[in-house]
Amino acid sequence: MERREALKRVAYLMGGAISATTMGVLFESFTVLDKSKMVNFSVSDEAILAEFAEIIIPTTAACPGAKAAGLGTFIPKMIRDCYPANLQELFASGLKAMDEKCIKTFGKNFVTLSDAERLQVVTELREDAKANHKQPSFFTIARDLTILGYYSSEIGCTQAREYLLIPGRYDGSAPLEPGQKAWATS
């Protein structure tokens, strides 16, 4: 099975957790992406995206977070490999705008902000995305790819959720105890 097909299946299972834009990109068949229009991401962009993803899915005492799952490299790879040129450009300009806003507001880039400052920036981006929910945004795409990448990673499948290598019978309404992790199977 190809990685893109596996990600489609994970996205399908996540249903409402991922926006229609991301679901559309994953399920739409792009025969050839125009490589001349592809956006490239720098190492510093990957560092920013790793920190952004860590705000969405932070490390806890029970489980490593998004940064440990390698989302700083996963997100740009998905943008380049799966998204059409217009959404690649929207994402890249949103990433740049976020970092410029950090410099204007705090005098430092996103990576060097404190956790509280990063949370403030991400919360503002989320509120802007909610206000313009009909339009795709940097925040929405980055959040969706964080969720998708994390829960399709080894850490997400084996540590963030209960892992059962060979499942028993399917029970669509199995009760979960308070604080119990959701199930992941292979």
Image (tube, rainbow, N blue to C red):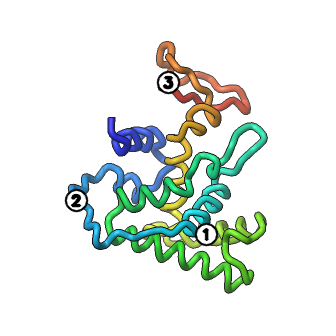
Q: Are marks 2 and 1 in contact (CB under 8 Å)?
A: no
Real-space CA distance between mark 2 and mark 3, rounded to the nearest whole angstrom? 38 Å
Depth check: give the residue in front, 121 or 80: 80
Tell me which label, 1 or 3, sits earlier in the chain: 1
Rounded to the nearest whole Å, what is the CA distance between mark 2 and mark 1? 34 Å
Residue drawn where x is 38% and y is 42% of the image? 3
Q: Picture coordinates of residue 23 (x, y %)?
A: 39, 52
Quarter of the figure that contains the N terminus: top left
Task: Choose between 162 and 80: the one closer to the eye.
Answer: 80
- Look at the picture and state if 158 lies above or below 151: above
Relative to 144, is 121 above or below? below
- Where is mark 3, residue-wise? 172
Q: Which residue is mark 2?
A: 32
Compare marks 2 and 3 and give the one earlier in the sequence.
2
Determine the secondary structure under disc 1. helix
Residue at 34% across, 72% down: 86
Mark 2 or mark 1: which is in front?
A: 2
Quick one: label 2 or label 1, which is nearer the N terminus? 2
Task: Find the residue positioned furthest to the bottom.
Answer: 104
Number of residue marks: 3
Residue 36's x, y, as percent?
28, 72
Query: For the residue marked with disc 1, what is the amino acid?
Result: Glu
Give the side of residue 142 with respect to residue 27, left or right.
right
The answer to whether residue 160 is seen in the rendering is yes
